[in-house]
Amino acid sequence: MTRTLSLLTPSGRLTLGNLLGALRPMRERQEDGFYGVSDLHAMTTEHDPALLRERTVEMATLLLAAGLTEATLFRQSRVPAHAQLAYLLECTATTGELNRMVQFKEKGRAVGSTRVSLFTYPALMAADILLYRPEQVPVGDDQRQHVELTRDLALRFNRRYGQVFTVPEVATPPVGARVMDLLEPSRKMSKSADPSSGGSVFLLDPPDVVRRKVARAVTDSDAGMDAVRRDRDAKPGVTNLLDVLEACGGSAEGITTYGALKKAVTDAVVAVLEPLQVRHAELAADPAYVAERYAAGEARCREVTAPVLAAAEAAIGL
Ligand code: AMP
């Protein structure tokens, strides 16, 4: 059995991209799956406490609604070992190393108001990983450098203080659907996109909102009989709509116009979102049940991570 670990940051609301690219593959691997809402990672940039709490609850509820009922679910902040081990890893990492992280360079280096936590975020991420001793960590390209750092820190810690951590391999994740922004199909549909922009379909968008967003999706001016076809370079918007249609179980057979394509995409997306939204509403009406599920998951996480933290503390001299 392979242990799978995945954290989603409540820095925005979950999108159709998250569902097709992350939640669906997660649902296929629930046995020994540890899936967390990384609320601590959502505080590395300016944040509103009430909004963070609201998004954390929504995301936690949506993970259950999406069918992750067998996995161990948790909120990162409720498993204190994450923050505790992160500190020991901050005492292992160097400023030179953290300064070289591309995300930090792009998002905050040389800006005086940047939070220290944005700089030290990779140490917390390394703790998230090392606490669960996964052998492999499947991550996308944007997180690859952070997992390489996690390996370096684990190796260094083991060499200096004794064999404590399993050094994880970086794995290429199974190819999930990659959903692009409806208005800017050259970039990924993102949960942190401006909610009013219309480029992201959120999992709790009602059918009429989905319809409106898909109707406004960028296509092109090709009006030929074969306009509805995949061509990632020349027709990124149309290709994205076809990908979404297929991933949502629809078919473009016989469709020749963009209007008909958009209608089919809307129907397919709504059909996928509807049961999820119904389940979400049921769960949202029973917050005690959701809280109980997470409390049980967090108790399990505390149990699983305690020996790793204890070994690290003992080795480093605490
Ligand atoms: P993020 O929302 O970028 O923090 O990513 C959380 C998870 O969702 C990761 O596993 C991503 O690969 C996946 N994901 C995010 N956006 C998309 C997207 N537009 N299409 C496919 N997968 C996505």
Image (spheres, rainbow, N blue to C red):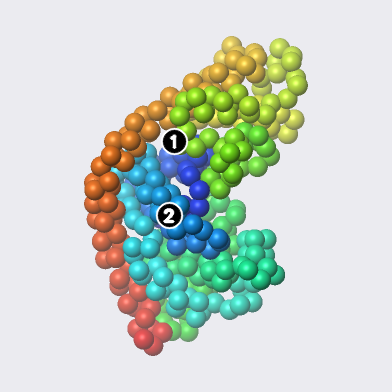
- Amino acid at the residue labelled 2: Ala
Numbered label attached to residue 50 = 2
Q: Is residue 289 visible?
A: yes
SS of the residue under disc 1: loop
Image side of residue 31 versus residue 223, left or right:
left
Image side of residue 301 versus residue 180, left or right:
left
According to the image, label 1 marks what residue? 204
The residue sitting at 35% across, 74% down in the picture is 309
In the image shown, does 187 or 175 lie closer to the viewer?
187
In the image shown, does 196 or 78 lie closer to the viewer?
196
**Residue 163 position by quadrant:** bottom left
Mark count? 2
Q: Tell me if residue 153 comes above or below residue 246 in the rendering.
A: below
Q: Residues within 10 Å of mark 1 (few under 14, many from 20)?
A: many
Residue 216 % position (x, y):
63, 27
The residue sitting at 57% across, 58% down in the picture is 144
How far apart marks 2 and 1 lie (CA) works out to: 19 Å
Label 2 or label 1, whichever comes before in sequence order = 2
Among all residues in the image, which is located at the extreme bottom? 317
The residue sitting at 41% across, 50% down in the picture is 54
Q: Is residue 63 visible?
A: no
SS of the residue under disc 2: helix
